[in-house]
Structures are given as structure tokens and as C-alpha cells.
Image: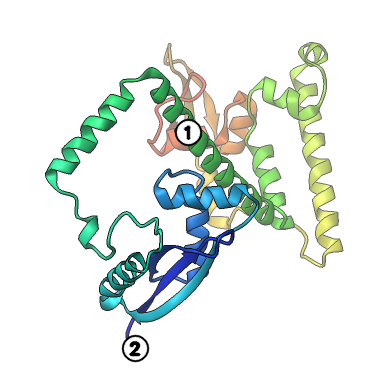
Amino acid sequence: MKLSGYIYRMIDPRTSEIRYVGQTIVRPKDRFKKHLCDSQRLSTHVNCWIKGILQAGLKPVMQIICEAEIKNLDPFETFFIILYKNSGCDLTNLQIGGQAGKIISEKTKQKMSVSKLKNWSDPAYKNRQIRKIRAGINNDFDRIKAIFSESAKRVFSEPDVIAKRIEGIRLTLGSDEQKRKKSGITKAVWNNMALKQKEERINKLHSNNRARLIKLNEARGNPVYKEHLSAGMRKFREREFNVFSKTTNEFIGTWKNQIQCAKDLLVCVTNISACLRGIAKTAKGYTFKYKY
């Protein structure tokens, strides 16, 4: 099967005149959409003409002239541009078509470079271009953020995923300020509470969430939430290790369970694991070493 493309023309709906001839190897409707988008950001002759039509509340008319193999598109495009120009059509094409007019000489490149440098030396032009670039970056960022947001909503709509996430939050105890925010009480009341009361408040919060998710799973016909750590991982996390002070090298104690150590020292369990595996050196002013 031979690859083919299209030769097309664009007509002004206000005067019914042929104003542009082009070629494309994509679907004609996709090339038409690209013309409309380019007219909003580029200032070439054809784009200014399309922009004027759009401002009048109309759209240019795109018609397929012929279909040809890709290797024959350039000569066909050149033929129809010359044909319509000789017929008196006021085409917006600046070149004769094909690749002939797209090869820029070194002299032309030098002129374009000088022109660009002169424009960018003007502070007003420079600021205007920077605003356009920033606006484009912000639009792309918002679009990407929306895509990831929708993806996250789909992923975390699964009850098992939500349950594991909440269980991970419960195991990974953060700072006092993070605990206070999760518990939903004021800072003044939080500071007056004993450490034990704070932990009870957090555990109660997570147990309520866990119960709610189990109920949700049962309602949807899913199995009840199970501990996601495998037996092998549980055995690995129950390997005995010693804890020392970073500054004085004072022996703090020995723990068998990383999760329990995280609760006692108020250190993130992930950071403890990283220290024991040699990825990190310290965590919250402590060093962690396996006994064997």
C-alpha cells in the first residue's frame, strides 16, 4: 500500500475567491484545525487572512483538489499554485510550493538573525514575548495538572487503594503540626494535650476512616480490607536494630519493629527504613543500625 497525501485549497467565504493552496499527509480536517490554531499565534500572510475571517464570525472553506502519492505532493502543489496565480487568484502563498521555497540561504539566515536581535534589544518587545512564553507554559501546566488530577481521581476511587493509602498515613506518623491538622483541632488546644492523648486522637481518627472504608468495601461487594504487608516484608521489618543519638552517639535503645520505633520516636517509618538500608545517614537526629 502506497502512502498518499492531499492537495487542498482554501476559499474566502466572503468573496468566494481561492486564497491559499497547500498539501498535507494528515487528515484534511486535522490540517484545517491546525490552520485555525496557527492563525491565533502566527502573523504570516495566510494566518492574518484566516484571523480576519474568524474575527468576522466566519471560517474559511477547505476543498480537496486531488489525492497523490507523498513523493508527488511537491510538484502537484507547485503546479496548482502557479496555475491559480496565472489565473489571477490573489493567493496568500509566499512561496511557489514544494521544498523549493523552504530552503533558506545563509544570507537570508543572517538577515533574519540581525532582525531578531534588533527586536529583542527593545525592552517592550522582550517583555511582550516573555509574557507570551509564560502564558503558554502556564496553559500547558494547567492542562497537564488536569490530566493527572483526573487520573488520580480514577485511581483513588478504588476502595482498596484508599484503604492502603490511609493505612500508610497511619503508619507514617509525621510532625506534631501534621498530626494536629489531621485531627482537626485548634493549635492552642493541641499544645495543651499530652503526648498520649495526641496519639489516641490520631489512632481514633484513622480507625474511624478504616471502619468507613471496610463498610464501603462490603457495600460494593469487595473483600474486607486485609493487611497489605506480605509475610516476608513483615519478617524483614521485625529485624532487631539499635538506635543512637546523632550528636553524642548515645545509645537510645533496641527495637524489633520499625513501625513501633516510628511511633515511639515520632520519626517517619520510611526514613527509618532508608537509614537501615544505607540510603540515608540520619533521621530526626537519630542513627539506626541492625544488630546483625
Residue lying at the far bottom in this picture: please name it.
1
x and y percentages locating residue 28 in the rendered image: 48, 70
Q: Quadrant of residue 258?
A: top right
What distance separates the C-alpha of mark 2 from that of mark 1? 44 Å
Q: Which residue type does callout 1 highlight?
A: Lys
| Mark 1, other Cα within 10 Å: few <14 / some 14–19 / many ≥20 | few
Name the side, left or right, on which 163 lies relative to 50.
right
Q: Which mark is residue 279?
A: none
Q: Residue at x 68, y 25 (%)?
A: 178
The C terminus lies in which quarter of the figure? top left
Q: Disc 2 vs disc 1: which is toward the camera?
A: 1
Q: Residue at x 14, y 48 (%)?
A: 105
Q: Is residue 236 above or below residue 33?
A: above
x and y percentages locating residue 277 in the rendered image: 41, 39
Label 2 element class: loop
Query: Of residues 134 and 209, which is closer to you in this image?
Result: 134
Label 1 element class: helix
Query: Of residues 241 and 184, which is closer to you in this image?
Result: 184
Res 234 visible: no
Q: Are marks 2 and 1 in contact (CB under 8 Å)?
A: no
Name the side, left or right, on which 131 lies relative to 91.
right
Q: Which mark is residue 1?
A: 2
Res 98 visible: yes
| Mark 2, other Cα within 10 Å: few <14 / some 14–19 / many ≥20 | few
Sequence-first disc among 2 and 1: 2
Q: Is residue 61 above or below residue 45?
A: below
Q: Which residue type does callout 2 highlight?
A: Met
Q: Quickly name the residue at label 1.
A: 132
Q: Quadrant of residue 9?
A: bottom left
Residue lying at the far front in this picture: please name it.
88
The N terminus lies in which quarter of the figure? bottom left
Residue lying at the far left in this picture: please name it.
106
